[in-house]
Image (cartoon, helix red, strand yellow):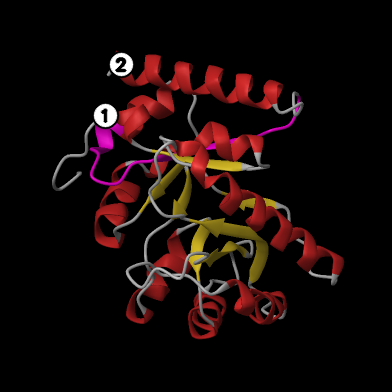
Amino acid sequence: MSRIRDDLAEIRARVASALDRASRAGEEVVILAVSKQQSADAVEAAWQAGQRHFAENYLQEALAKMDRLANLGIQWHFVGRIQSNKTRPIAERFDWVHTVDRARIAVRLNDQRPASLPPLNVLIQVNQAGETQKAGVAPSGAEALARLIVEQPRLRLAGLMTLPPAAEPPESNAEYFLELRRLRDRLGARGIAMDALSMGMSADFETAIACGSTCVRIGTAIFGARRAGGI
């Protein structure tokens, strides 16, 4: 597990360098450790190394880890595709959701968020390239969805998320990242306040930071190869 500590230290150094190169030194970028198909022991090792934000894609796997690690005070993010029949445990157990892409899901998350908890932080997933195999609202539909989310009392609209097409070299995704930032800024100019941009993964997070990312989703660069089961 010492490798996880060392890999986290390397990621933090690379994030700091990317911020400096982008003249963003002093700004915070959340490193989101994507722990899907990783063991609870691996998550705890990252927590012991100072990591506090973790992301899961698969609900049942996530709930098992949450139960085992309940005493750690982890900030849990859901980054998987949301099925309508799975919204209740997501609303009840997670702190952040990055993949809201339609009105029905937003309303269900709001209605099922316990009043005893703070509003659920949500991001709108934007499918910029129109890829049919990926979830996400089209850029043209983001404003209507954002306005609906703002009206939900148990939700807090935090920002936007994107998962652009796989690209080589990673710098090829810069235009997608820049366009997501422009979309956020346009919505802000229309009175829809948000600040988060969840963009960038292990292969391209430095490019994303150069384009304004505030949250990078890092999995294999922290934990190594995924393992089936993950618990």
- Going from N to C along the chain, the mark reached first, 2 or 1, is 2
Label 1 packing within 10 angstroms: few (<14), some (14-19), many (20+): few
Q: Which mark is residue 224?
A: 1
| 227 sits to left or right of 124 | left
Which residue does the image show at 25% across and 60% down from the upper left? 60
Q: Is residue 188 magenta?
A: no
Q: Which residue is mark 2?
A: 3
Tell me the mark number nearer the camera, choosing from 2 and 1.
1
Element type where label 2 sits in the image = helix
Quadrant where the N terminus sits is top left
Q: Looking at numbered disc 2 in the image, what kind of residue is underneath it?
A: Arg
Q: Position of residue 79 (x, y in %)?
A: 42, 56
Closer to us: 137 or 102: 137
Q: Are marks 2 and 1 in contact (CB under 8 Å)?
A: yes
Residue 203 in the image: state x and y as whole percent.
41, 35
Boundaries of the magenta span: 26-42
